[in-house]
Image (tube, rainbow, N blue to C red):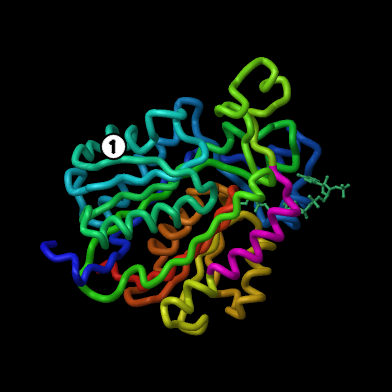
Amino acid sequence: MSTTALRTVSILGTGSYIPEKVITNADLAKIVDTNDEWIVSRTGMKERHQARPDEAASDMGAAAARQAMESAGVTADQIGMIVCASITPDMPFPSTACYVQRLIGAHNAFCLDITAACSGFIYALELAKNAICAGQVDTALIIGTEKLTSVVDWQDRQTCVLFGDAAGAAIVGARGAPHGIRATALGSDGRLAELLMLPGGGSRNPTSPETIEKRLHYMKMSGRDVFKHAVTRMIEACQKAIAKAGLTIDDIALIIPHQANLRIIEAIGHRLGAPAEKYFINIEKYGNISAASIPVALDEAVRSDRIKQGDKIVLVAFGGGFTWGAAVVEWDKN
Ligand SMILES: CC(C)(COP(=O)(O)OP(=O)(O)OC[C@H]1O[C@@H](n2cnc3c(N)ncnc32)[C@H](O)[C@@H]1OP(=O)(O)O)[C@@H](O)C(=O)NCCC(=O)NCCS
């Protein structure tokens, strides 16, 4: 692309990677005091997947990235930027994005990780869109990849039943036509940080025998509070993004919400006034896969023909931070 004046940005291809091993609700009932009836009725989850011990976030992210590149018809050397969203990076540094770069051979890219928890993919999309609109790069690879089974406390039934492992990716690129990403609405509220966090292992609580004894290296969540804020903020973000795009809910063909709890999705659906068939739901298979949630669901929606050329869709997420965001995308892959 020689000019940036007319640049719009589209999702040109998607991919995903789901580890083989399945953990069912019955498996969890053998580890903690829980049962299938509670998990299904309170969350909608039936299964989640677990990565192999030798599989890290970058391995899963690279597998999803390869699929997205193939679906977009983009080669590794064409990628100018890799943004990797994860709360379970391979390690604090180097970035998981740099490891993905090495695995896929995208040596022309600059690479960075972002931490926006379950909203990470929407934040990555926003960064990629802005870099492309500004003419900084033509093509970006964005990834959400999580190995949450490595940070849940397997003694805490309130969290360990909820999370799984997976990765999703998308290739985002410049277009001349006025389609693609029509509008976004993002927000954060650090005043509520303590409601969902992994307190240990950083500069606040460096790893020590004491932090390990206090189990600070595991995720902590105040589920009921998170639930309330998730519903409010996801509705608000959807409404803002749809209005910014100059559309109404009736124009939207499909809503892909972050899959944290089926009851959250139903509450959003009820308040937004869109019929149930407009919501893409796969929570029963994967549980909450944080930053991988939206790109895995998007990839499944594309591959199962739930999204057609020209459809206007909404991606919406909420996560620790708190962070939230929605994007209205006019599907323009061809
Ligand atoms: C976590 C969540 C599923 C809990 O559901 P809930 O209906 O709020 O349940 P509560 O936490 O009020 O707990 C209700 C009861 O179930 C019990 N319980 C909690 N986890 C349980 C489990 N796995 N199995 C059986 N019982 C369980 C609680 O101990 C509590 O028992 P009590 O009434 O005797 O005290 C729900 O709050 C949620 O999904 N929150 C948002 C999560 C989220 O979005 N996180 C990520 C954001 S990206």
User: Where is residue 239 drawn, in percent x and y?
Assistant: 54, 75
Q: Is residue 294 left or right of residue 45?
A: left
Residue drawn at (44%, 30%) of the image: 90
Residue at position x 62%, y 36% in the image: 198
Q: Position of residue 298 (x, y in %)?
A: 43, 60
Residue bearing the label numbered 1: 101
Q: Is residue 296 above or below residue 3?
A: above
Please give the range of residues in magenta. Answer: 221-237
What secondary structure is the stretch in magenta mostly built from? helix
Identify the secondary structure beneath mark 1: helix
Which of the 4 image quarters holds residue 300?
Answer: bottom left
| Relative depth, front residue between 91 and 21 | 91
| Quadrant where the image shows the C terminus | bottom left
Residue 287 seen in the current view: no
Assess whether residue 9 is covered by the magenta stretch: no
Please state if 332 lies on the left or on the right of 216 as rendered.
left
